[in-house]
Image (cartoon, rainbow, N blue to C red):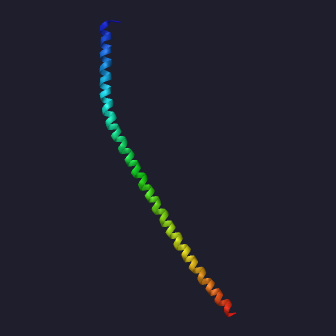
């Protein structure tokens, strides 16, 4: 292999190496910024979904508590009515 071809190969390899290092440095900096932004957006989406789940769970708990109180008051009224009826007999 001629010397000039080897020299071009070495220079071409160095140029490629230097160019790729510069590109990788830029891609590394901006890539990490974009990854951090994507992680923050993903985290915020998960937090919003979790808050939505918690509010739905709280709504159902309030509905169940109201239904339980309503049933308890109905049972107390029924027992009072039944006791009054037994007392009269």
Is residue 22 positioned above or below 13 on the image? Answer: below
Which residue is located at x 31 percent, y 7 percent?
Answer: 3
Image point (36%, 43%), residue name: 36
Q: Residue at x 32, y 14 (%)?
A: 10
The residue positioned farthest toward the bottom in the image shown:
88
Give the quarter of the figure containing the C terminus: bottom right
Q: How many numbered marks, from 0 up? A: 0
* Furthest residue toward right: 89
Q: Position of 89 compared to 48: left or right?
A: right
From this view, report whether residue 9 is shown above or below residue 89.
above
Residue 32: name its quadrant.
top left
Query: Residue 31: x percent and y percent?
Result: 34, 37
Residue 22, relative to residue 66: is it above or below?
above
| Residue for point 50% across, 66% down | 60
Name the spot of residue 51 as percent of width and height, x first. 43, 58
* Residue 34 image point, x, y percent: 34, 41
Tell me where residue 18 appears, x and y as whole percent: 30, 23
């Amino acid at each position: 292999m001629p010397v000039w071809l080897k020299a071009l190969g070495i220079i071409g390899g160095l140029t490629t190496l230097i160019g790729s290092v510069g590109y990788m440095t830029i891609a590394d900096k901006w890539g990490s910024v974009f990854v951090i932004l994507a992680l923050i957006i993903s985290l915020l989406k998960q937090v919003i979904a979790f808050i939505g789940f918690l509010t739905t769970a709280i709504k159902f708990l309030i509905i169940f508590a109201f239904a339980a109180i309503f049933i308890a008051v109905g049972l107390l009224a029924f027992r009072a009515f039944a006791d009054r009826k037994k007392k009269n007999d």
